Image (spheres, rainbow, N blue to C red):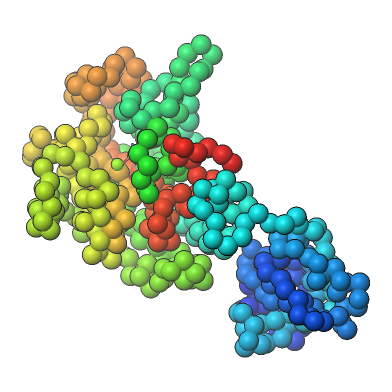
Amino acid sequence: MEPGDGVVLISDILGGEHVEKDVTVRGWIYRIRSSGSIVFAVVRDGTGNIQATIKKNVVGDEEFEKASQTLVESSVKITGTVAEDERAPGGYELKASNFSLIHMAEPFPITKDQSEEFLLDKRHLWVRSQKLTSVMRVKATLLSAAREWFEKEGWVEVTPPILSASAGEGGSTVFGLKYFGKTAFLAQTAQLHLEALIFSLDKVYSLTPSFRAEKSRTPRHLTEFWHLEGEAAWVDNEGNMDVHEQLISHMCQVVAEKNKAQLRELGRDPTILEAITPPFDRITYSDAVDMLHDKGMDFTWGDDFGTVEERLLTEDLVSPMFVKNYPKSAKAAFYMKENPDDTTTVLCSDLLAPEGYGEIIGASEREVENHTLIDRLLEQGADPDNYEWYLDLRKYGSVPHSGFGIGIERVVRWICRLDHIRDAVPFPRTPSRFYP
Ligand code: 4AD
Ligand code: MG
């Protein structure tokens, strides 16, 4: 029960809590129609929808008149008796004794069958839709489950900067901006700053927006996404993957328990998520290339995997799978530790989500030798002077360490079975859109 006025949550009514009781619901008109001397109004309060029947002979002429003229998305407060009714959507109905209109909406611009572009222009209103509401609830649970896991395992949450002097992931996809006569960059990753913090805090994580000036219009790229990153001292590439499989499994378990209704609404069977438990399969990049060849794909060893390759690798899986030890030519990040057993590859891992969704985590063990880091920066055309502070980290008590970045919207897209990543975020930013 919410404080005041006997206001209750619609989800509680639908859960059978208030049968035959007098209650008040408040929310927005989802659907409304009148038939003679009865108005049927479906009200949404953010926890669920319930149908209210408003009868002229019960509420009186004036209130009935108001109810019958009320437009969709108007805000209302309705008091009445909760009745079980098989015919009502959700199985319960509110027999209104009082109808009060809080704000009469103008005709709502969103009606059936509108184009995707129109819905994106009206995103500030479309975020009220059942689908996006369910997605946002699932996302909130995933984030709180992740924090719960980190907390339990002794990781410290830190707050790295977003404005940065150098590119973290390579110059080609970095957004620059004017910074008092200089150029600053929007962070692509918090990794380098997180690395600085492990020397005192050991295991750190952060949740920040990351920015990528990627022109690619794919269903899995945003220009601004939420990045959950971790970095830990004394952890090698295999230990890093242990962390990911535990964390992702915990997130799946919690969301399967807490958001059954939303998941079902989105077409995701929660039992599939309940079954996601460690360990996840770990295959090498070379194994993955063999798999692609077995599936009849023409693919050259040394190239990076894109949407198509990752879909082929994962479409028949139900659990996520690691692909590790990519060639340097495919995963070029300068900070990835060279594989001592095969110097053409690096000690990294991508976690690929099943059912064709593909990469959700990018991770690696980090290079700890300064001369190697400098060589790699130069190979990539970067100026080591811009990384002076980062190179300092290898001068004072360098330790083996590893870290990872989870694209939260990528995880949400998989968990919620979304066709496009833009629905994993309320206000998507893509190459062609930063409004509303
Ligand atoms: O694989 P990425 O580029 O790795 C890093 O940025 C590392 N520095 C992270 C780290 O080790 N701290 O990005 C990490 C993840 C990807 O696996 C993907 O899930 C997500 O971030 N990601 C994007 N999500 C949405 N839109 C984009 N344009 C994304 N680019 C990366
Ligand atoms: Mg990656």
Q: Quadrant of residue 98?
A: bottom right
Report the residue at 68% width, 69% height from top. 31
**Of 434 and 186, which appears nearest the observer?**
434
Q: Position of residue 152 (x, y in %)?
A: 43, 55
Position of residue 266 in the picture relative to residue 436 (left or right): left
Q: Position of residue 238 (x, y in %)?
A: 22, 48
**Of 436 and 107, which appears nearest the observer?**
107
Asked if one can make out residue 245 in the rendered structure from this viewpoint, the answer is: no
Asked if one can make out residue 120 in the rendered structure from this viewpoint, the answer is: yes
Position of residue 336 in the picture relative to residue 275 (left or right): left
Q: Is residue 80 above or below residue 176?
A: below
Q: Position of residue 259 (x, y in %)?
A: 50, 67
Position of residue 243 in the picture relative to residue 40 (left or right): left
Q: Position of residue 401 (x, y in %)?
A: 28, 38
The number of callouts visible is 0
Q: Quadrant of residue 95?
A: bottom right
- Name the outermost residue toward the top: 181
**Of 45 and 270, which appears nearest the observer?**
45
Report the residue at 71% width, 63% height from top. 72
Ligand 2 image position (quadrant): top left
Q: Is residue 416 above or below residue 169?
A: below
Name the quarter where the C terminus is drawn. Answer: top right
**Of 36 and 371, which appears nearest the observer?**
36
Report the residue at 45% width, 40% height from top. 430
Name the quarter where the N terminus is drawn. Answer: bottom right
Report the residue at 10% width, 34% height from top. 343
